[in-house]
Image (cartoon, helix red, strand yellow):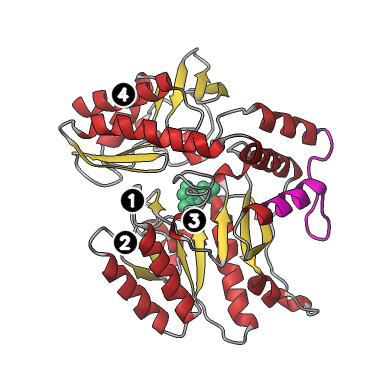
């Protein structure tokens, strides 16, 4: 749309790259205004789980929009939020008994950190240091940026970012260094919480680590009483093969951040789930000790209705079977692709596939936008992270569409 005043995210407008206009979507396909069908190979930034415009989610949104569009959530409530909170408590691990709503993955993490500090303050033991993992990503608000990898994305804002402790990424064979570093950080009396993406670091390059390491990490936190915050904004809702990535390690966090697939990817909504201990620390007759956080659209009823439909789909449909089957189908394609010259470190976790292609390195590698353009031409939406190509399709993707993604990758690699 030439001449549009829209300022797009993570877009250098000065490069004048084309920005296609999408008019409608169905399943794993997007349809552009100029009449093209595009296969959505990244679930529209990792949000679309069951497919675009799932009929049950669309119906729930329509119905709720005709009843109650929005209501202040401080001091007021509504049925979709109550139903959703109960269903989440039922679905997620037992110690997570409290549900706090917000609007995005970033805010769900900010909320978790504020809850953690509130917990320690209420105990009269004010701890404020946050420990994070190397290459992590938790969002683009100032607090979330502070906890993510430092680099070109946030260099300009560095003076605003708070200081955090960091543990190295537990690459295979170097796991002990991660655990030792965590042990050292936790031995200090000031660590409030560890914030991590369980098993898969998304924006940091689709880096995977082993469940046993996550279990050890959780154990170190527990030993030192450090709160363990699982940012499952990307990994949640089946991406890594199980509903939560934490499941594979047999761990339960003190605070759990969910967004993206919470509404099946249809509307913005997030939750931070907490244990009784976190809630009780803020429970008092003193108003000064309440949890001070809100935003205008907290628990928007239409978004909650969409999330309720998502949970109903998980309950009624064979979602886990679809996920397992998609994993196996991806694995077959990956085996072929991994043999191509120029493809390195081909890897898969559940429904997520990633590989490195020989290049100049770094997020700003000029090859990434060239590849993205080639994918667009081939009718596929993929958005490499620097020299890392990854595939994370909706679970409903058909065989032909999945094959077209891998054909496009093979061509791009050859080119
Ligand atoms: N945490 C993780 C692990 C993410 O992958 C993302 C986004 O990709 C976020 C937080 C931030 O979510 P949002 O973009 O909805 O603010």
Q: Are the residues tagged 2 and 4 within 8 Å (C-beta)?
A: no
User: Looking at the rendered structure, which numbered label has been put on residue 408?
Assistant: 4
Q: Nearer the viewer, residue 75 or 333?
A: 333
Mark toward the viewer: 3 or 2 = 3
Q: Residue furthest left?
A: 341
User: Looking at the rendered structure, which numbered label has been put on residue 207?
Assistant: 1
Helix, strand or loop for disc 3 = helix
Q: Which residue is mark 3?
A: 247
Label 2 and label 4: CA atoms lie apart by 31 Å
Mark toward the viewer: 3 or 4 = 3
Residue 7 in view here: no
Q: Are the residues tagged 2 and 1 within 8 Å (C-beta)?
A: yes
Label 4 and label 1: CA atoms lie apart by 22 Å
Q: Are the residues tagged 3 and 2 within 8 Å (C-beta)?
A: no
Kindly indicate the quadrant of the structure image that contains residue 403: top left
Kindly indicate the quadrant of the structure image that contains residue 353: top left
Label 3 and label 2: CA atoms lie apart by 20 Å
**Is 283 above or below relative to 169?**
below
The percent coordinates of residue 329 (x first, y second) are 38, 30
Instruction: Quarter of the image for the C terminus: give it.
Output: top left
Q: Which residue is mark 2?
A: 169
Residue 219 in view here: yes
Q: Residue at point 51% right, 52% down?
A: 244
Is 125 magenta? The answer is no
Callout 4: few (<14), some (14-19), or many (20+) C-alpha neighbours within 10 Å? many
The percent coordinates of residue 127 (x first, y second) are 52, 81
Label 3 and label 4: CA atoms lie apart by 33 Å
Q: What are the residue bounds of the magenta stretch? A: 65-88
């Amino acid at each position: 749309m030439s001449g549009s005043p829209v300022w797009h995210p993570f877009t250098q407008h000065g490069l004048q790259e084309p920005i296609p206009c999408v008019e409608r979507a169905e399943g794993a396909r997007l349809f552009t205004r100029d009449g093209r069908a595009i296969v959505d190979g990244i679930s529209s930034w990792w949000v679309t789980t069951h497919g675009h415009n799932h009929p049950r989610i669309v119906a729930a949104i329509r119905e709720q929009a005709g009843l109650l569009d929005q209501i202040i959530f401080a001091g007021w409530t509504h049925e979709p939020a109550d139903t959703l909170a109960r269903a989440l408590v039922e679905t997620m691990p037992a110690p997570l008994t409290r549900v706090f709503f917000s609007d995005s993955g970033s805010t769900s993490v900010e909320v978790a950190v504020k809850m953690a500090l509130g917990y320690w303050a209420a105990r009269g033991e004010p701890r404020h240091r946050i420990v994070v993992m190397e290459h992590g990503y938790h969002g683009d608000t100032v607090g979330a940026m502070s906890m993510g990898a430092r680099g070109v994305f946030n260099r300009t804002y560095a003076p605003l970012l708070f200081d955090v402790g960091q543990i190295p990424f537990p690459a295979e064979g170097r796991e002990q260094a991660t655990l030792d570093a965590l042990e050292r950080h936790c031995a200090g009396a000031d660590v409030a919480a560890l914030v991590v993406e369980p098993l898969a670091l998304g924006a940091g390059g689709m880096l995977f680590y082993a469940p046993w390491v996550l279990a050890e990490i959780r154990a170190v936190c527990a030993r030192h009483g450090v709160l363990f915050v699982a940012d499952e904004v990307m990994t949640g809702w089946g991406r890594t093969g199980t509903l939560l990535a934490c499941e594979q390690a047999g761990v339960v966090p003190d605070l759990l951040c969910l967004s993206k697939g919470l509404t099946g990817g249809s509307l913005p909504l997030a939750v931070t789930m907490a244990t009784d201990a976190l809630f009780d620390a803020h429970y008092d007759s003193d108003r000064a000790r309440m949890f001070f956080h809100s935003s205008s659209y907290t628990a928007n009823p239409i978004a909650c209705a969409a999330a309720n439909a998502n949970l109903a789909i998980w309950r009624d449909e064979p979602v886990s079977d679809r996920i397992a089957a998609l994993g196996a189908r991806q694995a077959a394609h990956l085996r072929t692709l991994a043999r191509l010259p120029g493809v390195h470190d081909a890897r898969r976790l559940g429904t997520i596939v990633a590989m490195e292609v020989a290049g100049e390195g770094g997020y700003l590698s000029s090859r990434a936008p060239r590849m993205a353009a080639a994918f667009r031409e081939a009718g596929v939406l993929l958005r490499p992270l620097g020299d890392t190509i990854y595939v994370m399709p909706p679970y409903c993707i058909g065989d032909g569409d999945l094959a077209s993604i891998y054909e496009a990758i093979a061509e791009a690699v050859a080119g």
